Image: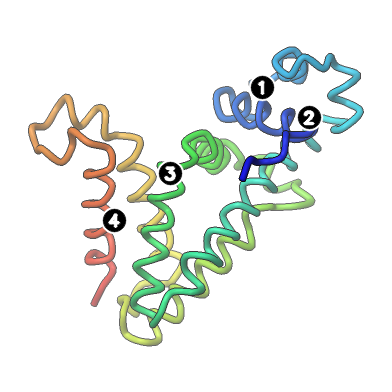
């Protein structure tokens, strides 16, 4: 079944995601986004009256997608061990399926130190809290090291996967391991091993 055609608002969100991913919040220009969408500044401002509003909408779209994937992939997995494995697999699948979204969220985590203090809404927070709850449950069940705070475990998992994705092209040039030749093989190996790092 064919997907319904995108609305102008959806088109703006898609193009804005690319601009924010490439240039960050500060570097992205509303005029450039409007030109890319062929709507002009008034057309863009009709849907999103400020850069902050547009950026928040782009992040909310990412958060909604991550939560939908979490519900479909993790919440419906079997036991807690399977849910934990599904959670790590979900991160890798999302990076592969949504490279622009991954780049945007990574940039947001790196660039938002000042903005987060004044932010009225933090779209990614629910995903992070649900992630933390899953890890706390896994610790209580003895599947993850209890001496590490759950937030440290979350940092290790997300940090390892993000860094692995970012450095693979450089590592592939520097090192001769065959798994580095393929992004999919490399990320699968890292995803498997990151759970070993945090296991008791």
Please identify the residue farthest to the front as the structure is shown. 1
- Label 3, on which residue? 95
* Secondary element type, mark 3: helix
Q: Residues within 10 Å of mark 3 (few under 14, many from 20)?
A: some
C-alpha span from label 1 to label 2: 9 Å
Residues tagged 1 and 2 counted as in contact (Cβ below 8 A): yes
Choose the circle earlier in sequence order: 1 or 2. 1
Horizontally, is 72 left or right of 139 in the view? Answer: right
C-alpha span from label 3 to label 1: 22 Å
> Looking at the image, is 133 positioned above or below residue 21?
below
Quadrant where the N terminus lies? top right
Quadrant where the C terminus lies? bottom left
Choose the circle earlier in sequence order: 2 or 4. 2
- Label 2, on which residue? 51
Residues tagged 2 and 4 counted as in contact (Cβ below 8 A): no
Counting from the top left corner in percent of width and height, residue 142 is at: 32, 85
- Label 1, on which residue? 28
Horizontally, is 31 left or right of 149 in the view? Answer: right
* Depth order, front residue of 98/151: 98
């Amino acid at each position: 079944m064919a997907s319904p055609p995108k609305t102008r608002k959806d088109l703006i969100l898609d193009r804005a995601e690319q601009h924010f991913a490439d240039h960050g919040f500060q570097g992205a220009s509303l005029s450039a986004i409007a030109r890319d969408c062929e709507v002009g500044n008034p057309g863009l401002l009709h849907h999103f009256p400020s850069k902050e509003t547009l950026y928040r909408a782009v992040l909310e779209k990412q958060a909604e997608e991550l939560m939908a994937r979490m519900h479909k992939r993790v919440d419906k997995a079997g036991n807690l061990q399977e849910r934990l494995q599904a959670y790590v697999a979900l991160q890798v699948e999302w990076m592969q399926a949504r490279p622009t979204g991954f780049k945007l969220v990574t940039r947001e985590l790196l660039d938002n130190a000042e903005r987060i203090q004044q932010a009225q809404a933090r779209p990614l927070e629910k995903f992070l809290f649900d992630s933390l709850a899953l890890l706390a449950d896994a610790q209580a069940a003895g599947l993850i090291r209890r001496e590490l705070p759950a937030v440290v475990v979350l940092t290790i998992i997300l940090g390892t996967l993000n860094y692995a994705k970012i450095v693979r092209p450089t590592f592939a040039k520097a090192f001769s391991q065959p798994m580095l030749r393929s992004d999919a093989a490399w990320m699968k190996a890292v995803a498997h091993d990151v759970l070993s790092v945090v296991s008791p």
